[in-house]
Image: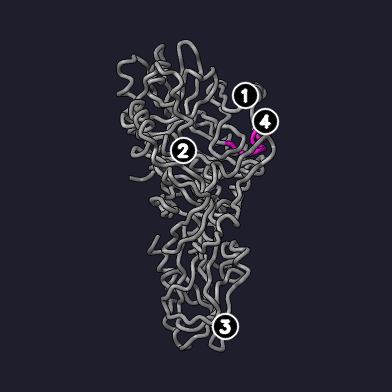
Amino acid sequence: MSEIPADLKYTDSHEWVRDEGNGVCTVGITFHAQHLLGDLVFVELPDVKKALTAGEEAGVVESVKAASDVYSPVTGTITAINETLASTPELINEDPYIDGWLFKVKLEDEDELESLLNAEEYAEKITEED
Amino acid sequence: MDPQRTPLYEEHCKAQATLVDFAGWSLPIHYGSQLQEHHAVRNEAGVFDVSHMTVIDIKGDNVRSFLRYLLANDVAKLPLKKALYGCMLNESGGIIDDLIVYYLRESPAYYRMVVNAATREKDIVWIKKQAEPFNIDIEVCQDIAMIALQGPLALSKLASVLSPACMNAVSSLARFEACTEGHWFIARTGYTGEDGVEIILPEKEAPLLWQQLLNNGVKPCGLGARDTLRLEAGMHLYGSDMDENVTPLESGLGWTVSFEDSDRNFIGKAALLQQKAEGVKHRFVGLILAAKGVLRNHQRIVCANADDGEITSGSFSPTLQQAIAMARIPASVKESHCQVDMRGRLLPACIVKLPFVRKMKDNQSISSCDEAQVQPSSGVYK
């Protein structure tokens, strides 16, 4: 598994976004983010049908070490959340890009995805942070 | 300044540890999963590099008198080979450091102290200053490594790597006893609540012991697991649970202060007696969160009819699968529950006795939070 899959979009705050087509995208936290946090033990996700603005707090992921807010990368409405994370938050550590997804958003503006970072830009960003 | 490297630094890199700067030392926080390391120590065996700890040897005829004055616990009650945990106080009763002292030889007297890494410099200055009238020999050990092997299988894992002579000596150790075998010092002590040993040995010999333990299925463990293990075991962390601004009496460490011999004077004694006479205003307790989330250091504790308390060490307990903490609350709190201010939300928690996880022979007892207890009919909690 690539640590920064080329087909995803990214944010400065370490969320990833996958375009699922038909105006829906899936959101999670990156491999880099879960690595910094360490073992995740608790996840708080938004309610389904909740409307969120890009940059707004959508939930919290807590590891043994620290709590970290998760922000919605886009503006839209929550259509689904990953309920299995309530009992198995470690999925985020084990498989952050597939089984460890957090929530799905119906985009208000499908073009908004274009404004997010691509894999290359995100890779540069985390290199700068190190 | 770059952090110092322990003699096991190369081993940590080989094991792909995530390294952090801890008290000026580059040490592993984990080798992949802090939770797996924690469970390894509770269920099997794990090994920690604790070479950052400061080891001080104190020798001379007056050492016993000196230590009876320096420490709030009384080394007079310490049989040969045994370890004693206690605090070194300032004149106000504030805790300069917590430490463990081993009584290794009767004549001329030889004691070994292990103190914290973060307090190394101030401890050495303080000890040397207090020792001036006693004419004793104080040596801070150099070129050594310290390895903590912990867990129910620790001793059997050790048996497969030690020489028979060495293992013989180790097998005869009761809990909290120590022995020396050549240049090695082996103590049946630890900071996890599990059986196990702490080994101090020449730094050049440390990588081989480390490799042999790993080859025998012992899991390398980092500071992350060390912290959750000691928290479950109700063991204090200097700098978080206590410091120079608080006394042992308000830190859950009253049991480490010995007033038994009324003729004995020790540094801080007058202040502690005064505090006892006036009434200790805080007590030190365990908390179990009765909601989802993780307790963190410095979170505010809201108690009924009392001032606020504060979490001194909070984390997630991998054994209990719940958030736990140690906290300082007003002594007047009588209830068995409280609320914790978690980022603006007040969540219910149970007040429990420490430790959270206790090993009794082969059985493990763990604290629990009676949820019924924290859902009062008054509707205080949402």
Amino acid beneath label 4 = Ala
Find disc 2 in the rendering and name its residue: B252
Viewer-side residue, B371 vs B147: B371
Is label 2 in contact with label 4 (beta carbons under 8 Å)?
Answer: no
Amino acid beneath label 2 = Gly
Find disc 1 in the rendering and name its residue: B173
Q: Residues within 10 Å of mark 4 (few under 14, many from 20)?
A: some
Q: Nearer the viewer, mark 4 or mark 1?
A: 1
Chain letter of mark 1 equals B
Is label 4 in contact with label 1 (beta carbons under 8 Å)?
Answer: no
Find disc 3 in the rendering and name its residue: A20
Chain letter of mark 4 equals B
First in sequence, mark 4 or 1: give its number.
4
Q: Residue at x 52, y 64 (%)?
A: B379
Taking B123 as reference, is B283 left or right?
A: right
Amino acid beneath label 1 = Leu
Spatial CA span between label 2 and label 4 = 36 Å
Amino acid beneath label 3 = Glu
Find disc 4 in the rendering and name its residue: B159
